[in-house]
């Protein structure tokens, strides 16, 4: 899959989960996609939330993999 299409699929996944993050005062942005690893930045209340890693793995990563199965992992960067 070409990089532009992959990025579009990842952005679509983030758009799907963003309303849940916004409702808690947080947000997320795509930083990069390298070797099927997505790097995102959590923002707002998501930064200090005690369950942000669970949200990242069970919510964000699962949603991204649903749209782009070749993604292996989603990592949060500062």
Image (cartoon, helix red, strand yellow):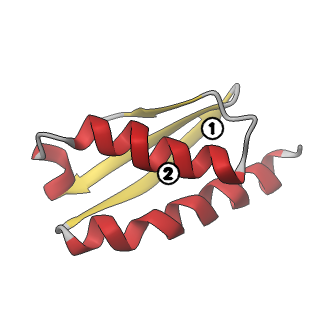
Position of 25 with respect to 27 (left or right) is left
**As rendered, which of 56 and 75 lies closer to the eye?**
56
Q: Position of residue 52 (x, y in %)?
A: 24, 42
**Image: 53 above or below 48:** above
Q: Residues within 10 Å of mark 1 (few under 14, many from 20)?
A: some
Residue 24 location in percent, x, y? 18, 67
Q: Secondary structure at mark 1?
A: strand
Circle number at residue 60: none
Q: Residue furthest right?
A: 1
- Quadrant showing the N terminus: top right
- Relative to 7, 59 lies left or right: left
Q: Position of residue 78 (x, y in %)?
A: 28, 36
Q: Which residue is tagged 1?
A: 33
Query: Which of 3/1 is in front?
Result: 1
Q: Are marks 1 and 2 in contact (CB under 8 Å)?
A: yes
The disc placed on residue 30 is 2
Please tell me which residue is depicted at 59% across the width and 49% down the height of the picture. Answer: 64
User: In the image, 26: left or right of 38?
Assistant: left
Decide if residue 26 is on the left or right side of residue 2.
left
Q: Name the residue rendered at 55%, 52% in the picture.
A: 63
Q: List x then y, in percent, for residue 42.
A: 30, 49
Q: In front here: 75 or 78?
A: 75
Q: Residues within 10 Å of mark 2 (few under 14, many from 20)?
A: some
Q: Residue at x 81, y 56 (%)?
A: 5
**Vertical arrangement, residue 1 with respect to residue 28, above or below:** above
- CA gap, disc 1 to disc 2? 8 Å
| Quarter of the rendering containing residue 75 | top left
Mark 2 residue element: strand
Q: Is residue 38 above or below residue 41?
A: above
């Amino acid at each position: 899959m070409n990089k532009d299409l992959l990025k579009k699929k990842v952005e679509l996944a983030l758009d799907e989960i963003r309303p849940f993050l916004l409702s808690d005062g947080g947000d997320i942005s795509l930083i990069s996609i390298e070797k099927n690893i997505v790097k995102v930045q959590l923002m707002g209340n998501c930064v200090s939330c005690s369950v942000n890693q669970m949200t990242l793995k069970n919510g964000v990563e699962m949603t991204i993999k649903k749209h782009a199965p070749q993604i292996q992992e989603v990592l949060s960067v500062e």
